[in-house]
Amino acid sequence: MMYKRFFSVCIDLAIVCSAFAQNVQSPNGKISLEKKGEAYEIQYMGKKVLNLSAIGVSTSAKEGLTFLRMNKGKKVKADYQMLSGKRTSCTNKANEYDFQYQYADGSPMRLVMRLYNDGIAFRYELSDLKEEKLKEEKTTYFIPEGIKRWMLQWSDGYEGFYPMSTTANVKTLGGFGGSVPQNDLNTHWGYPLLMEPADGVFALITEANIERRQSASSLFNKGELFNVKQDQNDLSLSGEWHTPWRVIIIGSLADVVESTLVTDVSEPNQLTDTQWIKPGVVSWVYWAYNHGSNDFNIIKKYVDMAVTLHLPYVLIDAEWDEMDKVASNEGKTIEDAVAYANSKGVKPLIWYNSSVGWINGAPGPKFRLNKPEDREKEFAWCEKIGVAGVKIDFFSGDNQMNMDYCMDLLESAAKHHLTVNFHGAPIPRGWQRTYPNLLSTEGVYGAEWYNNVGSFTNKAAAHNATLPFTRNVIGPMDYTPCAFSDSQHPHITTHAHELALTVLFESGLQHLADRPESFLAQPKTVQDFLSQLPNVWDDTKLLGGSIGEYVVLARRKGATWYVAMINGTDADKTISINWSRLKSKAKRVRVYADSGRSVAPWNVYETPVLPQSVDLKPRGGCVMILNEK
């Protein structure tokens, strides 16, 4: 008997040692994982990227993990289609490894680790749960002092800057979204967190595939240790349960920007009919008229602008439920506004307050979506009168209640052929694949903030040159770009910079921020650009960039490449462009650039030659359209 037990232990050890003697690697071999004691070390092309210094999750009844073995790896491969995003055709391809652990009570926990060519995703899978509540997640990332990182101080709307730092010892900003006094040491961070652990090697930390019975998470740090903390989840869990995927996108800046890892690991499309889902450009009232959506005549102006510019959508924002109370409307209601838009061939979108976040003092309509029966009634009415989609605002963070509520809204909206834009909401975590009627999400410090604070003016250009490497990596971003005139606070980015944002920032619904008079005063060539702007991209390529300083990004529609570039600095900048990644056979290039003159700010021209370098004005920009015909 002793011999048999000894022999069995030897076999178990041999399995483990054999498994780690093999290449625990991504399919292309660039990313590798090694278990070192209780920790896991991630490397990229032999360079250390990140340490998982602790792993696991505990419940009210389960503690004390012991590692048993790693099972034989398997291949993951699935192609899928997206209706919007960085590209239409995507591939979920990875090597998956199963690390077996055991709790002190004898029940199992699996650490499922997937190694992709552009990163790593892992989650914890639990079974034998018996009315247990989640206690804490142990996952901890070790980020040494001195490493460059771009981190967002957490707020429930994820609206803030991503300043570069080399330390976690950062003072809180206070004010908006802050729950601690200004100048205290910040310890709470939102996704994504971008870092540069080695020269030219980047890692972006986020999560993906929030499902029912789950909350989202964020990061809390004590010095160099960043712990994943799941938000409030009061459910008692039985049977099987797993966490969302913890995601680390790894590689060059291009690898990070072009990655679809967040949707790769998310559940496939749950909708059987998606023919009615149409991404597109939207005329939008709020940026210029804070309370304009209760004014029928202002709404007409935005509908008429959409007609002139051939935009498919108009958004009627908050307070439309008060339209009949405005004397100048002469009794007109939201139904009249919707009917007017549809009569002009423009699809109307309308706004709702989620009524779980900001309620007292907030605009309406309120409390129309919270109960299933009310939500069904409201969305059925929207479909009946010809509303094409809904913008739902003012959520209250990452908790499990919010996550389930968002999924309820997406599923109910889909029944009535309504697209969805979540505003004042947490960041995307893969629902854009699972529920493709979700075409955009705010979760960004965007152009709306020209309405609110003066501090956005001087920081916007650098912020805009940071977002393609941070927030927009993980999903659609309702930044509401492209303003040539001013809102309550001025902007100092150039006209070409603003135009470039419509290509640079990916969003299935691209809301144009400016007022009709401003758009219609632009040259016909610029109006034509907006009229023909795609919102479904077949591919995305980063051609160059330095975080916060400049970016050159190309997006393809069919055989045509749109190339957007912006200068995030206050100085002139000459940018060299390597066109080889596009493999373009362009015979004609249309260029939208800054003239540098205040009276005639545009320099729009055509050339048969791809320029090898471009001179950008301070806070300037440029867009090129590469045509093969």
Image (spheres, rainbow, N blue to C red):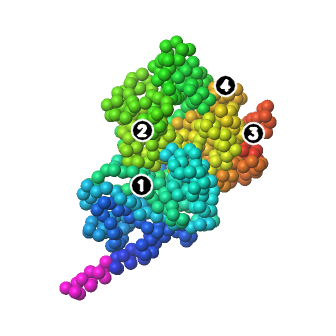
Tell me which numbered mark, 2 or 1, is placed earlier along the sequence: 1
Q: What residue type is labelled 1?
A: Gln
CA separation, marks 4 and 2?
36 Å
Secondary structure of the residue carrying tag 3 is: strand
Q: What residue type is labelled 2?
A: Val
The residue to which callout 2 is attached is 356
Residue at left 75%, top 45%? 618
Out of 227 and 533, give the one closest to the viewer: 227
Point out the frontmost of discs 3 and 1. 1
Q: What residue type is labelled 3?
A: Asp
CA separation, marks 4 and 1?
47 Å
Tell me which numbered mark, 3 or 2, is placed earlier along the sequence: 2
Q: Does the magenta stretch include residue 9?
A: yes
- Point out residue 474 in the picture as x, y percentages from the top left corner: 51, 50
Q: Is residue 334 magenta?
A: no
State which region is magenta: 1-12
CA separation, marks 3 and 2?
44 Å
The residue to which callout 1 is attached is 230
Residue 374's disc number: none
Quarter assignment of residue 144: bottom right
The residue to which callout 3 is attached is 594
Point out the frontmost of discs 3 and 4. 4
Classify mark 1: residues with Cα within 10 Å, few (<14), some (14-19) or many (20+). many
Out of 620 and 397, give the one closest to the viewer: 397
User: Is residue 28 in sight in this rendering?
Assistant: no
Image mark count: 4
For residue 430, above or below residue 337? below
Secondary structure of the residue carrying tag 1 is: strand
Secondary structure of the residue carrying tag 2 is: loop
CA separation, marks 3 and 1?
46 Å
